[in-house]
Amino acid sequence: NEGRYLREWIEFQRLMGVEHIYLYENGSTDGTAEVLRPFAAEGFITVIPWITFDDEVSPQRQAYAHALCNFGPQYRWMAFVDLDEFLFPVTAPDLAAVLSNYEDCPSICVPWYMFGTSGHKRPPSGLVIESYTERAFFPPPLKRMKLLKWKSIVDPSQVVAVGNVHLFDLASGVT
């Protein structure tokens, strides 16, 4: 039920040079389908219904594995991000330009900066990227090291397993 943020998130991805989005939809009831329909019609996103019943295995890990197996062979890079996460380059105009500097790497781990409520008691009407501007210190203080996480951009041909939702096991043995 992230419908209110979907359009912004999808357009942000487009501005960052993302080629295609595979969106795993797990039963939203908030008008998500209507928001996604025009993006799917133009071919920018593929919506995959993703309802799982197994509590033993993370549905998110299963979705990542599904994406890698079914769509990975078409791409040099795949990023795994949630709808409340925005990858943006700080040294280039788009993600493709940044990634071109890492062609010899099997994956890139991007620091995951934690943004909080930014003082809002209720979700504001503005854009997420304009409304939520306060973040936790990076790197976090030792007592808050659980905030130190990563988002992965991987070469799908090098992934042998989804280790967890933040790191992947690679053929080279590196995660």
Image (tube, grey):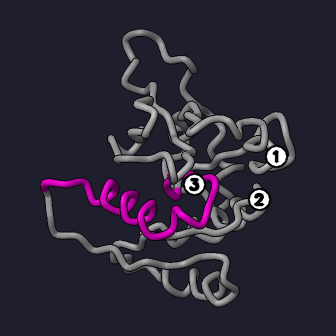
Question: Do the residues under discs 2 and 1 have CB atoms within 8 angstroms?
Answer: yes
Rendering coords of residue 155 (x, y %)? 56, 48
Which of the 4 quarters of the picture holds residue 14?
bottom right
Mark 3: secondary structure: strand
Q: CA distance from mark 2 to mark 3?
A: 12 Å
The stretch in magenta equals: 56-83
Residue sitting nearer the eye, 31 or 170: 170
Residue 17's disc number: 2
Amino acid at the residue labelled 3: Met
Mark 2: secondary structure: loop
Q: Residue at x 49, y 17 (%)?
A: 140
Tell which circle, 2 or 1, labels the residue nearer the N-terminal end. Answer: 2
Residue 62's disc number: none
Q: Residues within 10 Å of mark 1 (few under 14, many from 20)?
A: some
Rendering coords of residue 39 (x, y %)? 65, 81
Mark 1: secondary structure: helix
Task: Tell whether position 55 is magenta.
Answer: no
- Quarter of the image for the N terminus: give it: bottom left
Task: Tell whether position 70 is magenta.
Answer: yes
Please, is residue 24 above or below residue 93 in the view? below
Please name the residue that numbered disc 1 is placed on.
97
Question: Do the residues under discs 2 and 3 have CB atoms within 8 angstroms?
Answer: no
Tell which circle, 2 or 3, labels the residue nearer the N-terminal end. Answer: 2
Q: Residues within 10 Å of mark 3 (few under 14, many from 20)?
A: many
Rendering coords of residue 28 (x, y %)? 38, 76
Residue 78's disc number: 3
Query: Is 90 displayed left or right of 3 in the figure?
Result: right
Amino acid at the residue labelled 2: Gly
